[in-house]
Image (cartoon, rainbow, N blue to C red):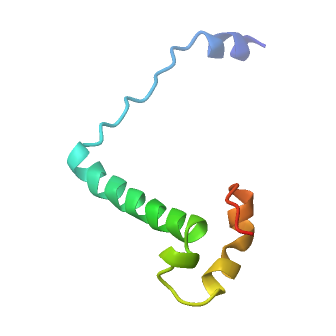
Amino acid sequence: MANLANASALPTTQPAPVAIPIRQLLPWAIFTAVLATILLYFVGAEQGATSVVSGMWVHEFVHDGRHLLGFPCH
């Protein structure tokens, strides 16, 4: 029991936060934003007059995801 009492009295140290420079973070943030925009286009708007790919295969491929995210498609 004495070990537990001494263990709680020990000082705890917290690691210092690591600073990430904006120059290293910015390319990844831009890449993520572009990828998210492309994904949003294919899930939400890839059909009809704005279609980049002809046919219905993209629509069928993302059909369930479209309904899950609340995009109407019928």
Residue extending furthest toward the left: 23
Residue extending furthest toward the right: 1
Q: Is residue 58 left or right of residue 53?
A: right
User: Image height check: is 20 above or below 2?
Assistant: below
Residue extending furthest toward the front: 49
Q: Is residue 50 left or right of residue 29?
A: right
At a point 64% along the width and 87% down the height, the residue shown is: 57
Tally the numbered discs: 0
Residue 67, x across and y down, in percent:
74, 62
Depth check, front residue: 39 or 44? 44
Depth check, front residue: 30 or 7? 30
Residue 4, x across and y down, in percent:
72, 16
At a point 45% along the width and 61% down the height, the residue shown is: 37
User: Image height check: is 46 above or below 3?
Assistant: below
User: Image height check: is 15 above or below 31?
Assistant: above
The C terminus - image quarter: bottom right
Depth check, front residue: 63 or 22? 63
The image quadrant of residue 61 is bottom right
Q: Is residue 29 left or right of residue 72?
A: left
User: Image height check: is 1 above or below 15?
Assistant: above
Depth check, front residue: 32 or 1? 32
Residue 48, x across and y down, in percent:
57, 77
Residue 35, x across and y down, in percent:
43, 65
At a point 25% along the width and 52% down the height, the residue shown is: 24
At a point 68% along the width and 64% down the height, the residue shown is: 66
The N terminus - image quarter: top right
